[in-house]
Image (cartoon, rainbow, N blue to C red):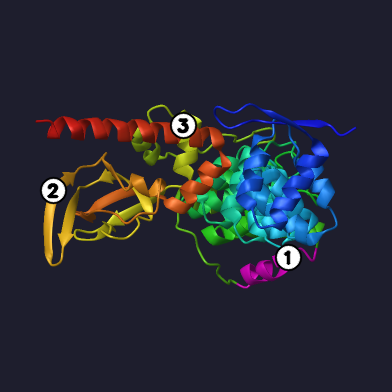
Amino acid sequence: MSEQVRIKGRTGEGDRFLPQEQVLAGLIKLLGEGRVDDAVTIYVRCAVDIGYPLISKVAGDPKLQRLVANMLYRARDFAKAAMVCEALEENEKAAALYEKAGDYAMAAEMYARAGNKLKSAEMYERGGNLSVAASLYADCGLPERAARCYQRVPDAFAAGKLFFASHKDKQAVELLQKVEEEDPNYPEAVVLLAQLLARNGYAELAEKKLRAAIAGREIDDSNVGVYYALGDLYARLGATEKAKEAFEAVLGHDFNYADAKARLDRLNAGGEEEHLPRSDLAADAQAEGVGDVAVGETASAEVVGMDPGLAFLKELDLFEDMSLDDLRALASVAEARSYQPGEVLIEQGAPSEAFFVLTEGTVEVKRVDGSTETRFATLPAGAHVGEMSLIDEAPTSARVVAAEPTRALALPTERFKELLGSRPALALKFYQAMATTLSRRLRATNAKIKP
């Protein structure tokens, strides 16, 4: 006996009870006649879910499957529409529908089948499978996005290494120094950290980090790279004897390691390396052996990067309910930009490509009408402009130009939206804050125009 299906009546009408098979046959008949709207109406009024039986009934008939998929889509039953498209091997459509349904794991799988690696990565990220997302982002040539995923895993080494490759030194230093000594990746992390420190003017600390990593340990396959890095650092600081000692240690362990022999030969012949900026270490290392670390000494002081942009974000009403972690996530996608007087931050009539927080200087907000410019606001440091670009892509209503040498923190629209897409809780806070901000502005405007 066929199961009974209750179909809710329209306002003022009673409900009807019909056998499930009759309802399914009726839907298929309506679809065959092109009466999709009628089929959708009946489908959404069914008090029980008949989607699965309907999908099963049309299995193997591609024409009917497409009709049913269209009906399910119009009924906003996106997950089942995706299932039908998957059965039809229309993977890109299935992926988009699974995404719309919020099933990010299935969306990721379907995008992967369709060959869309980037969208697959985005879906894995939104679904919380961060390691897979990071690997796919790296394959797509997007090391920063991969690094941010590893940062959230958390995998400090993988994230730090990718930030290093992206020349995001501040983030790389912060993460690489979190790698523990017990981690097999610790020696490589120390080498990368030392390179970052040296190229940013902290050669002495770089030397201490490298020396500490090998203190009390015999050279072996795991740490030979640290000895090589130490030789490289000394060579570029002009500390030739120290460099020779390090390269000789490398060659004593592995005579074919990298270009250690060629570099030692060059030093013995009086050749010079490309030098780092000289420091106190460079001046004194030859004579006094500055930087030698006694056995057991750890030289573990961390380098703390200061982010002045974070302070500006923290003071904005728009972000007043954000946690420190939220603000750091926002700051991680921000860019420091500089503008000379007259340079345009936002052009009237074009979508703004970023949200700007002014950190120094002032800007003028102007309305342009042909060749006429009318200034109607001057904004100081601490103000923000372009926030509507984070909501939509509508053309802006005014031009914003620097009135004097100006610095700003820019949150590029696309990167900001990617961040919100990967962090739903942060997105909820942001849109709630935006709604509150716009509500305050509307009330203020209404108060001004009240008779």
The mark nearer the N terminus, 3 or 1, is 1
Above or below 428: residue 198: below
Count residues near mark 2 (Cα–Cα under 10 Å), then give few for <14, some for 14-19, many for 20+.
few
Three-letter code, disc 1: Ala
Closest to the observer, 431 or 94 = 94
The picture quadrant where one finds residue 391 is top left
Closest to the observer, 259 or 312 = 312
Above or below 296: residue 290: below
Seen as rendered, the residue at the extreme left is 451
At mark 2, the secondary structure is strand
Say the numbered circle drawn on residue 353: none
Q: Position of residue 263 (x, y in %)?
A: 66, 68
The mark nearer the N terminus, 3 or 2, is 2
At mark 3, the secondary structure is helix
Q: Position of residue 396 (x, y in %)?
A: 29, 54
Question: In this image, 164 relative to 356: left or right?
Answer: right
Residue carrying label 2 = 376
Q: Residue at x 50, y 55 (%)?
A: 199
Question: In this image, 80 relative to 2: left or right?
Answer: left
Residue carrying label 1 = 258
Closest to the observer, 362 or 375 = 375
Q: Is residue 125 visible?
A: no
Whether 143 is among the magenta residues is: no
